[in-house]
Amino acid sequence: MDFKQIQELIKMINKSNIGEVSIEEKGFKLTIKQKEEPVQQLIAAPMQTHSVATMAAPPVAAAAAQAPVAAAEKATKAAEAPAGNFVTIKSPMIGTFYRSASPDKPAFAGVGDEVAPGKVVCIIEAMKLFNEIESEVSGKIIKVLVEDASPVEYDQPLFLVEP
């Protein structure tokens, strides 16, 4: 199962009333759980081992993290308000947002840059894997909505693009 298939599966489950889905393929196991709120946990581990990697935070950390998340959601809504004819590039996953491949390299995309479908605009690190995020739209980047090395949520707007 490739990354795009996993993304589509998460989107479909998020839109449905399904609480949990488990898939096993050739030594790979994927479990997606949905809480009452539209938040998913992604648990993936090779079948050969008994350890499970999870992206869920401990309850104490989750309570402490709710205030910054609420502030980020307010900032996101404020950023979307003037975006009448703009398109947003959103995060396809939970992780850490990076604008460049390393601190000494130039940013993949910045304000004023032209993007086209397939052009890498950033990297999101999730569970020690660095995932290149590609634009699905053509246009000019008007605003970068996330600070470099910041945590991002699933479906959080990252860039505003003028088509």
Image (spheres, rainbow, N blue to C red):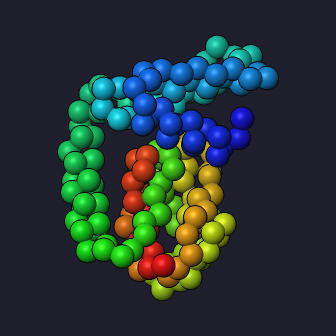
Residue drawn where x is 48% and y is 78% of the image: 163
What x and y, as percent, mark residue 134? Answer: 61, 62
Please identify the quarter of the rendering in which residue 109 is found: bottom right
Question: Disc count in the image?
Answer: 0
The foreground one among 59 and 76 is: 76
When the figure is inspected, residue 97 is found, relative to residue 46, above or below; the finding is below
Residue drawn where x is 48% and y is 20% of the image: 20
What x and y, as percent, mark residue 18? Answer: 44, 23
Residue 134 seen in the current view: yes
Quadrant in which the N terminus is drawn: top right
When the figure is inspected, residue 158 is found, relative to residue 39, above or below; the finding is below
Q: Going by the picture, which residue comes out furthest to the bottom?
A: 112
Residue drawn where x is 42% and y is 66% of the image: 88
The foreground one among 16 and 6 is: 16
Q: Going by the picture, which residue comes out furthest to the top?
A: 50
Is 82 left or right of 91, judged from the image as shown?
left
Please identify the quarter of the rendering in which residue 2 is found: top right
Residue drawn where x is 47% and y is 63% of the image: 89
What x and y, as percent, mark residue 117? Answer: 63, 69
When the figure is inspected, residue 154 is found, relative to residue 60, above or below; the finding is below
Q: Going by the picture, which residue comes out furthest to the right?
A: 26
Residue 143 seen in the current view: no
What x and y, as percent, mark residue 7? Answer: 57, 43
